[in-house]
Image: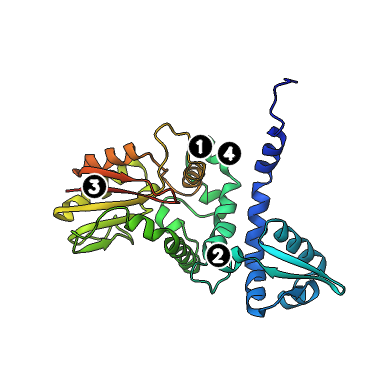
Amino acid sequence: MDSTEDPDYPQIIFQYSNGFLVSKVMFTACELGVFDLLLESGRPLSLDVIAASLGTSIMGMERLLDACVGLKLLAVELRGEGAFYRNTEISNIYLTKSSPKSQYHIMMYYSNTVYLCWHYLADAVREGRNQYERAFGISSKDLFGAMYRSEEEMLKFLAGQNSIWSICGRDVLTAFDLSPFTRIYDLGGDFFKDSIPEADLYILSKILHDWDDEKCRQLLAEVYQACRPGGGVLLVESLLSEDRSGPVETQLYSLNMLVQTEGKERTAAEYSELLGAAGFREVQVRRTGKLYDAVLGRK
């Protein structure tokens, strides 16, 4: 063995290999209602009370709660009568349903949909296409329809996106001075079939990353035609660095686009090229340092 091997290498590999276990612990605690129960109680609860309240086995719940303690999602207090658990601040803020910054719905979408699609990541890489058909037995011919197996799932996904927006929205909307734009249209729905109304500014939030370059050009061309002179388009996307070395979250999102959609994450230069092909000029880029960045093109 090379004597210069970094002693942290094994730990890094183990950390990466256990990553999906960490995610599933958090997803399961959310799904079972652990964080909501502890928030509503207003006090630490014993293992027996938690298991009985949520209808689980004591043995299984004990292991789940202890894993959450290790992840700093719960805190534990050992008393004479046993272990008592409470939420940590991060769980109260982001993992309880009632919190204004709750990420519960996106957690459930990741657990019930994204997690299953990623089981077929190797197939997606081999074939270069999404894996909805393998994961759920749904034809991917109509991708927009296939992305949601039911109206309930679609609503959960939309609720999850809104929860992310509650955290990241201010960063991207304040990246540029948008005050010159008086009529703003947030593009959504089936925009490949529906007409696009006239406006001064169009916001395309996490839309282009769902589609291949050809469909992005088609959509942006239609937006350009509808846009008033002097108007513009604001893209809200997670940007890859130009040398494609990161950020790692964006690289993972791009793999997620592979297993779930027709699209990918892109660099600022790639988005600028798409905007230029549609006719937009004076393209500006703002990296927020958070989940999503902003790209503004003017007509």
Disc 2: which residue: 94
How many residues crowd around disc 3 within 10 Å: few (fewer than 14), some, or many (20 or more)? many
58 lies left or right of 224: right
- The three-letter code of the residue at mark 1 reads Glu
- The three-letter code of the residue at mark 2 reads Tyr
Q: Are marks 3 and 1 in contact (CB under 8 Å)?
A: no
Q: Label 3 to label 1, Cα distance in Å? A: 34 Å
Q: Which mark is residue 297?
A: 3
Judged by depth in the image, the label closer to the viewer, 4 or 1, is 4
| Residue 172 coordinates in the image, percent (x, y) | 35, 55
Judged by depth in the image, the label closer to the viewer, 2 or 3, is 2
Residue 7 to residue 214: above or below: above
Disc 4: which residue: 122
| Residue 78 coordinates in the image, percent (x, y) | 82, 68
Numbered circles on residues, count: 4
Q: Are marks 2 and 3 in contact (CB under 8 Å)?
A: no
Please, what secondary structure does the residue beneath circle 3 have? strand
- The three-letter code of the residue at mark 3 reads Gly
Disc 1: which residue: 127
Screen quadrant of the N terminus: top right
Q: Label 1 to label 2, Cα distance in Å? A: 36 Å
Q: Label 4 to label 1, Cα distance in Å? A: 9 Å
Q: Label 4 to label 3, Cα distance in Å? A: 36 Å
Judged by depth in the image, the label closer to the viewer, 3 or 1, is 3
Please, what secondary structure does the residue beneath circle 2 have? helix
- The three-letter code of the residue at mark 4 reads Ala
Judged by depth in the image, the label closer to the viewer, 4 or 2, is 2
Which residue: 19% across, 50% down?
Answer: 224
First of labels 4, 3 by sequence position:
4
First of labels 4, 2 by sequence position:
2
Judged by depth in the image, the label closer to the viewer, 4 or 3, is 3
Residue 207 to residue 13: above or below: below
